[in-house]
Amino acid sequence: MAHQSTNFSMDNFRIDGMEIPYNHAAKVLIYSNYVCCGLGIPGNTLVILAVVLSKRVRNISTAFIVNLAIADLLTCCVAPIFSWVQGYDYYDPILEPVCQAVLVVVHSCIGASMYTLAAIAVNRFLVIISSRQLYEEIYQSKYVAVQIVVIWIIPISVAVLPSFVFGIGQQGYDFVLHTCAPVKDHPTTVVFNDILTFVLYPIPLTTIIFCYIGILVRVIIHNRKLAEHGVTRTSGNPSNENTQTR
């Protein structure tokens, strides 16, 4: 118990104007963030504009694609803030609230991206295995809107509730990494990281893998049936060979 309080007390040495240890990797990442910003903002903006301006591409699937683009766009928009934080050589208390706000945005947007990809995978899976009637019933506009709301509620809840409501972990400025990150000195930061990691990554990734493996299996089975059908037709009537090949 004494060891925990000693570690956590290190956070009390964050004094305005104190020198931050030099980190070369952090300085390099400053430029990487600007590159991501320069590529991500125009790219995701074009995706959103393409759907908004073209009626022909508007459908249920593009609703998820636009949601993914919005999440990625917001992530790219905060990249310059990371660069600004990493450029500090001396500690400033303003870094703490800035980092807390930025981390909420980043965790929420990354989580929304992951769950949107999972929703797209489920959509593709149901296109393959379900009847048209069931698909159209599930993907009515109102239900799609609910899905998108849930996609955002999950990561926002995980980013906000543990540390800001229940006091599990702490988010702020990391002296070693020169960036915004969960504060390692806090005794429950490990728990916060575990919650964040489990909710934002394994759940949507498992869904994505399951759906695309299911699609692959279904396609393989379908192709085998077509091949068997083609052999039967060809052996029964050789003149149909060219037709079957096409």
Image: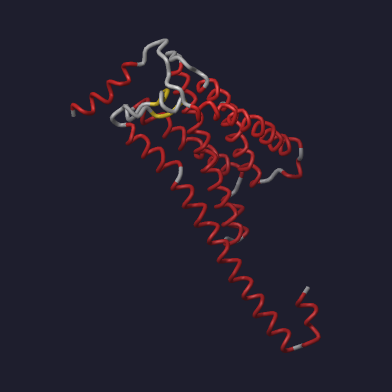
Instruction: Decide if residue 49 is on the left or right side of residue 79.
Output: right
Residue for point 72% across, 84% down: 233
Please state the horizontal and vertical placement of residue 162, each as a whole percent of the image.
Answer: 36, 31
> In the figure, 245 relative to 24: above or below?
below
182 lies above or below 116: above
Q: Picture quarter containing residue 191? A: top left
Residue, far top: 17
Choose top left, top right, bottom left or bottom right for residue 55: top right
Residue 19, given in percent of the width and then of the height, sits at 42, 15
Image-based side of 205 in relation to 239, left or right? left
Q: Quadrant of the C terminus?
A: bottom right
Residue 195, percent from left and from top = 37, 39
Question: In front: 146, or 207?
Answer: 207
Q: Establish if 102 lies above or below 224.
A: above
Quarter assignment of residue 212:
bottom right
Q: Residue drawn at (47%, 35%), measured in percent from left and top? A: 153
Quick one: 92 or 205, which is closer to the camera?
A: 92
